[in-house]
């Protein structure tokens, strides 16, 4: 059996959480990541018959039975993942009942998965139903995007349109736009269900006045997605109080989307 600390997926979790912390997106215990792993790959590092303990999830995740995830722990700080992955991360498998997680590695101090486990697992179910390649769900509190929530209308079309205007590549990186949920109580099955519903149409979902969820096929793509949205929000926050002299026009966005061959939300453009 190989040493799990040499597994690429553990390294990716360590590097990504450290990057997100340094970018200021994950203060204190803010943020969480779940990453769907390949069973054969995990079997190189862990005995899959050895369950450390069982943790009830409180919701039904039948479509994910048998699936294995590496996930950040509840109350844990992204700042600390790199120096102690075995305490701050865990590897869990969804049991046959669909409502229990079997701990295969990690959460060494007796901890458990993020309080946002429902939103993560429900988002995985939603994304996998529209994109079988989806493996990563990421939640964080990016500073500028959060600031933008306070000064911009929280209408999905308007919010997306403003972001698309802020950097030329935005419409290419998130052509499906940004879904927006109203403020809701976090850590609940309800916000999980609402997030998953949005995740059928969007890979980015803003939790109003809280943060963002991103989903993608791998860690780089998902991180890059949130990074691009946050960059656009930063440009917005740097310019919102200044007279706007120039902008990317809707017809330019159409040119971009067509040139790069992306399927974009035409209804989010205000074409005359
Ligand atoms: O886990 O970010 O939304 C900490 C959070 C909750
Ligand atoms: Zn949060």
Image: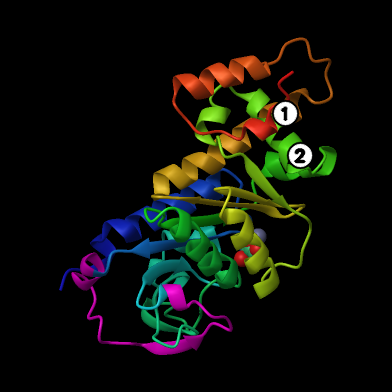
- Residue farthest to the top, as pictured: 245
Q: Which residues are magenta?
A: 40-63
Question: Does residue 256 appear left or right of residue 164 in this picture?
Answer: left
- Earlier in the chain: of badge 1 and badge 2, it is 2
Cβ–Cβ below 8 Å for labels 1 and 2?
yes
The one of 263 and 44 positioned closer to us in this rendering? 263
Viewer-nearest residue: 208 or 255: 255
Q: Position of residue 68 (x, y in %)?
A: 36, 72
Q: What colour scheme was applied to this rendering of the protein? A: rainbow
Image quarter of the N terminus: bottom left
Q: Using a 10 Å C-alpha cutoff, classify the residue at mark 2 as few (fewer than 14 neighbours), some (14 to 19) or many (20 or more).
A: many
- Where is residue 174 drawn, in percent x and y? 55, 36
Task: State yes or no: residue 49 in magenta.
Answer: yes
Check disc 2 and report its element: helix, strand or loop: helix
Query: Label 1, label 2: how many angstroms apart (C-alpha)?
Result: 8 Å
Is residue 172 something that shows in the picture? yes
Q: Viewed as shown, does residue 185 lie left or right of 232? A: right
Q: Position of residue 90 (x, y in %)?
A: 42, 73
Residue shown at 32% from the left, 58% from the top: 9
Q: Name the residue beneath numbered marker 2.
A: 148
């Amino acid at each position: 059996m190989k040493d799990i600390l040499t597994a690429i997926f553990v390294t990716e979790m360590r590097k990504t959480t450290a990057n997100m912390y340094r970018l200021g997106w994950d203060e204190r215990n803010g943020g969480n990541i779940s990453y769907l792993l390949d069973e054969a790959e995990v079997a190189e590092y862990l005995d899959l018959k050895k369950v450390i303990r069982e943790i009830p999830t409180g919701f039904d995740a039948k479509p994910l039975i048998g699936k294995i995830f590496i996930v950040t722990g509840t109350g844990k700080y992204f700042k600390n993942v790199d120096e102690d992955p075995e305490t701050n991360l865990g590897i869990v498998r969804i049991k046959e009942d669909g409502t229990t997680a079997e701990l295969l590695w990690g959460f060494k101090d007796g901890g458990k998965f993020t309080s946002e486990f429902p939103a993560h697992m429900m988002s995985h179910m939603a994304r996998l139903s529209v994109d079988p390649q989806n493996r990563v769900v990421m939640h964080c509190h990016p500073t500028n995007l959060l600031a933008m929530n306070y000064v911009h209308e929280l209408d999905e079309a308007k919010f997306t349109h403003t972001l698309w205007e802020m950097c030329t590549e935005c419409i290419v990186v998130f052509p499906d736009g940004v879904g927006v949920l109203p403020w809701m109580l976090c850590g609940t099955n309800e916000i999980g269900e609402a997030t998953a519903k949005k995740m059928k149409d969007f890979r980015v979902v803003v939790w109003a006045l809280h943060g963002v969820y991103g989903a993608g096929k791998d860690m780089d793509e998902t991180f890059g997605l949130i990074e691009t949205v946050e960059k656009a929000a930063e440009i917005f926050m740097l310019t919102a109080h200044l007279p706007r002299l120039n902008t990317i026009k809707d017809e330019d966005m159409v040119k971009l989307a067509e040139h790069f061959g992306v399927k974009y939300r035409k209804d989010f453009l205000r074409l005359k």
